[in-house]
Image: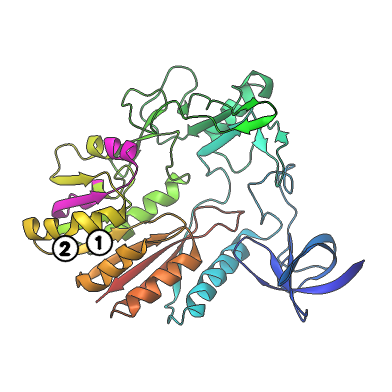
Amino acid sequence: MSMEVIAGKMIFGGDCIAENSEKKIFIPYTIPGEKVQIEIEKDFKDYSTAKNLGIIEKSRYRTEPFCPYYGKCGGCSLQHIDPEYQKILRAQILRDAFLREGITVPEIQVISSPDRGYRARFQLHDGGLMEKRSSEIIPISHCPCATEEVNRYLKEIPPNERPRGRVHIFGSKYITSVPDGFDKIVISKPETPPVRTKGKKQKAAKPRHEGTSPDSESLCTVSLLGKSITFDAQGFFQSNLEALEKTIPLITEGLSGKNVLDTYSGAGTFSVFLADRFENTILVEHNKGAVVYAEQNLAGKKHKSFGVSGDVWVKYHAETCRKELGAFDAVVIDPPRSGMEKSVRSWLKSSDIPVIRSLSCDPATHARDIQELASAGYKLKKLFLLDFYPQTSHIESLGYLEK
């Protein structure tokens, strides 16, 4: 049975919640204020998900999606919304997450870049993209959000001639390590597909530890603000390098001193710049493969790397570092989607470090972490929406905390 509803507030993920409903109904591909014809798709105890059957009254911010795969591909979710209004909605989602934790939110500053042609990092599955909520493969030859370098590959190599399995590609004008073949693009080895034994799917073992081989064919070096940074394209690296170049100065702005801690440091992207401002830079990163590259990226700079989790570093190394080097003047922290580990939050609360620059790719866990730090006397001075992923609901944010 179909019904008419008014789309209310947008939530993280890009759905809107139906107004004046007995329980929450999540509606995709809508804009707050629109009247929509919907049909309940799945009904759960506390909420329902709906199928959008059509817009009855359109928002003035509604636009025509520019990609023929929109709605099928699992990438974009907001192409139906004017790009400038998308930023307003993402900022509202970020603000709401912090308000729910009782945090006083300063004016959110938006750091953005072009809304198309920005995405350098892709995962291809059997030569195409995975369809949304499906294992079907979309054999694409062009992506409007991809960089020119990625699109050159998609255009010149037909889907049926691309490697099978899951392949990571990274293409950007920022690449300085140009491999043989396509200009400014790195293509990883296909990951070994799962094998089936007597009808059962088994998880395939990875052929190597991610990033640990310095001569890996998926090695990639980019130049950011005059610095060379090497990483493994098969692992994680920021997809929007233009926005990253705008973010790095925000990380380092006003910071200097004797000791700085970069935790969840990855390949040392921020440490490369922090090391110019501090006598000692300490990196903590659980992925030992990324630490291999961090060591390469910080060669010649005074630093020390720990290939352990934040939890292990706090338990076994934090006090030793403090005794050897003295107190930390600042911390830069960029945890995964799950946020800071509990022990890391506890350690920061008791550390009396005067300045924390906190990054996150999840508004809810970011707000939770900052609320806990606020309970120890830290104040949120600035909040940035790092708009790295236009046309999607993905939100990255940066908070300035001071004590």
> What kind of element bears circle 2?
loop
Q: Do the residues labelled 2 and 1 touch (CB within 8 Å)?
A: yes
Asked if residue 369 lies left or right of residue 161, the reply is left
* 288 shown above or below 370: above
Residue 314 in picture, x, y percent from top left = 24, 59
If the image is split into quadrants, where does the N terminus sit?
bottom right
Image point (36%, 61%), residue name: 341
Label 2 environment density (alpha carbons within 10 Å; few <14, some 14–19, many ≥20): many
Q: What stretch is highlighted in magenta?
A: 272-293
Image point (38%, 54%), residue name: 246
Q: Could you tell me the amino acid type at mark 1? A: Val
Q: Could you tell me the amino acid type at mark 2? A: Phe
Judged from this view, the residue extending furthest toward the front is 198
Q: Which mark is residue 331?
A: 1
- The quarter of the picture where residue 194 lies is top right
If the image is split into quadrants, where does the C terminus sit?
bottom left
- The quarter of the picture where residue 336 lies is bottom left
Residue 48 in picture, x, y percent from top left = 76, 67
Q: Give the labeled residue for mark 2.
A: 328
Label 1 environment density (alpha carbons within 10 Å; few <14, some 14–19, many ≥20): many
Image point (44%, 17%), residue name: 180
* 72 shown above or below 370: above
What is the CA distance from the residue labelled 2 to the residue labelled 1? 7 Å
Q: Residue 82 carries which label?
A: none
